[in-house]
Image: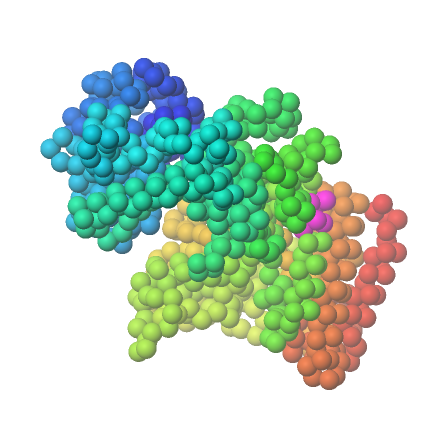
Amino acid sequence: MVTLALDIGGTRMKLALLQDGKIIKESMVPAYRDDAYQKNLDQAETEGRRMMAEMGLDHIDGLGIAFPGLVNPRDKVVVSANGKFVDAVGYDLKSWVKRTFDCPFILDNDSNAALIGELTYGCAQDTKDAVMMIFGTGVGAAAVMDGKLVRGKHFQAACIGGHMVIEFGPDATPCNCGNIGCMEANASSWALPIFAHKDPLFETSMLKDLDVIDYRNLKACADKGDELSVKLLRRSLDCWSANLCNLIIAYDPEVIILSGGIARMEELAELQAIGMPPAAAQGVQRRGERIMTLRSGDELLAAASFDQRRTRELLALLGDPVRVNAVRNAASGRLLCITGMYGRDDESLQLLLTQLFAQAMEQDCLWALFAALDAPASPAADDLLRQQGMRPVRPGDPSLLLADMSAPVVFLQNVETAIKPPFSGDSAVLSAIRQARRRFKLGLVALYPGRLIFTISSQLVLHRLVEKITALNGVPMTPTQPRVLGPYMCVPFGKLLRRAAIPNTVTKTIHTDKVFAADRRTQWIQAFPGYAPLADQMRVVHSFRRPVILVDDQLHTGRRIGVLDPLAREQQVEIKEVLVGILSGQGRDLAQQLGRDVDYVYFVPNLRAWYVESTLYPFIGGDTVEHADMERSGLQPSVNLILPYVYPEHLRQCGADAAYTFSRTCIENTLYIIEALETAYRRVYARNLTLRRLSEAVVLPLCPDKGRMTYNLDGAVSDYLRDDRETLRRLENLFR
């Protein structure tokens, strides 16, 4: 079921296409003012049709319209517009919908619609009694009691909650609704300048020198100690508090929700504590951009201000035709526009960027743009953006960076998971991994210039997978005593969950392995060394007589599931769902062909290339090689798809020089991490870390397959890596 949502505002209209309650495409266009209801509806039709066409839709199943005034939802007409869109009152909306989209529709007050959204998808999902107060130009409100909107005889019971009377008498303030003493007339964006100008302190106040007196500027002046600003801010807080008390008394809610621009002041103040300059906070407030945050409990770790625009909408954001044309010459379609990013550390910022990119790709953004509108990016933020593949739109201008996200390069960072405790928590080892990771990402940037490097943390994917498994199984994420198992069985067949314990869930891993032929020309999936054949492992799964949740790291080419799905059908294993960390568009198509339901943590519609960090680091990771004649020296023979071990096709396509540089980076990164491991190992055990002891520090030690060459088990891994680096150096003239 596909529906269209239309939110008509005083300055802009927001539209979203939803499929089964999930946004699949969204847009925003300026709104015409005054007597322009018909013009706004015409614009909404044009934009809605464009969105439908881009999604391959010729019809929608329903339409929802939110209007900033009193409406009769039963007859679907506007009753009062309170000075906005006066021509909307009594407008025949039924005929317009019949003529345009020809589908069922609903019309409601925008505050009511906002509260229903919070009850259904937002912060009030677990309650049936809630009140919402929305701060815009005026103050709106909505209430739900026992799961039903409070409307009243004339459809104004709660949505005019900003017009509760908080003062009376001959000096009560007139309100634009016709009453006197309304809360909105005393403490709203439109009322604030009136109170400021008539106060005796105005002549000596900072507010006198401002072109616009609004709550953003009021808060800034109050923070500087301006007497009138402090007075007006305290008065407004008293008025809002009184109104909230009235709403609480009237509706007895379990949850109170504050929303709108004024409600964001504290949020923006919190962002300033992690590095957002005051000018940037003011710009975000003025432009109405969205904020994405990353938190650990109540602690704010990172935040970014952003919006989504098409190239034809950039002038309103950038304000400079020259800059707009520069972007338009390099990009087209829908863009994710990041206007600021702030965080306590690089890792928090990287996690936030990953979430931001993931959301934008699901919403069909093709480009990622960073535009420093109010303040330049910090050196750390600028460096991190460059690691994502973003580069200047104009040479020498760091304020405007761009990356193509239509087909990103996915980078799964996972080296920490390949190291055993206590070394996986050693500060020097972790520092070496972080420094190596930065060089790795910049190496990918050189391989794929201008393309987004979509960086994903394997530890976060693991956490999200466990969340999804336990939710699907109907069990808590923490172990219960006594243990209560869910009805489904978790069957991981990739690497991420190979050693993980899923709380309150029967778990049985199918141990698979990707194996290369000795000539590296072919590869296939088989049982991991030391485990039963895959068919026998599937028989064991069937013996549990439980529906199965199949879990893999990623689904793109489908090599693993292509082998396991026929075995599951043969054994009549009931597969409830396939769950993957990263799903590509190609992988989703494959799941549909197999008739399997698939869920994911991250979705990449068009995946350009896929790199797993540990597999590029010799001795720490890699892919297995079939080599029956090789003396394995107690280590599993492997191949890392870099020079000098092999020259794979995907590196050839990137150019010889870039392939050489990237391969050298991988070997030097490995050497850097191994040297840190060797130092930490000597500190803990007072002996050297040799090949023989590598399994004490690395989860699954591997050795690069070099034909019949044998390894000295008492030698140091770092010595072999230095030899491989020297071998590569001698090949340099062939690639440069």
Is residue 706 left or right of 375 when viewed as pictured?
right
**Residue 690 appears anywhere in the view:** yes
Residue sitting nearer the eye, 419 or 76: 76
Determine the image quadrant of residue 4: top left
* Residue drawn at 61 percent across, 71 percent down: 425
Residue sitting nearer the eye, 733 or 181: 181
**Residue 588 appears anywhere in the view:** no
Is residue 443 one of those drawn in magenta?
yes
Q: Residue furthest left?
A: 153
Is residue 556 one of those drawn in magenta?
no
Number of marks in picture = 0
Q: Residue furthest bottom?
A: 686
Q: Is residue 233 above or below residue 457?
A: above
Q: How is the image coloured?
A: rainbow
Is residue 460 left or right of 327 when viewed as pictured?
left
* Residue drawn at 44 percent across, 58 percent down: 298
Q: Where is the C terminus found, in terms of image quarters?
A: top right
Which segment is the magenta one? 441-447
Determine the image quadrant of residue 506: bottom left
Measured as percent of width and height from the top left, residue 392 is found at 68, 35
* Residue drawn at 33 percent across, 66 percent down: 475
Residue sitting nearer the eye, 153 or 121: 153
Q: Is residue 144 above or below residue 56?
A: below
Q: Where is the N terminus found, in terms of image quarters?
A: top left
Measured as percent of width and height from the top left, residue 202 is found at 44, 31
Measured as percent of width and height from the top left, residue 160 is found at 23, 34
Is residue 661 left or right of 387 when viewed as pictured?
right
Measured as percent of width and height from the top left, residue 323 is found at 63, 26
* Residue drawn at 43 percent across, 56 percent down: 579
Q: Is residue 538 above or below residue 247?
A: below
Is residue 236 left or right of 628 when viewed as pictured?
left
Characterize the magenta stretch by its predominant secondary structure: helix
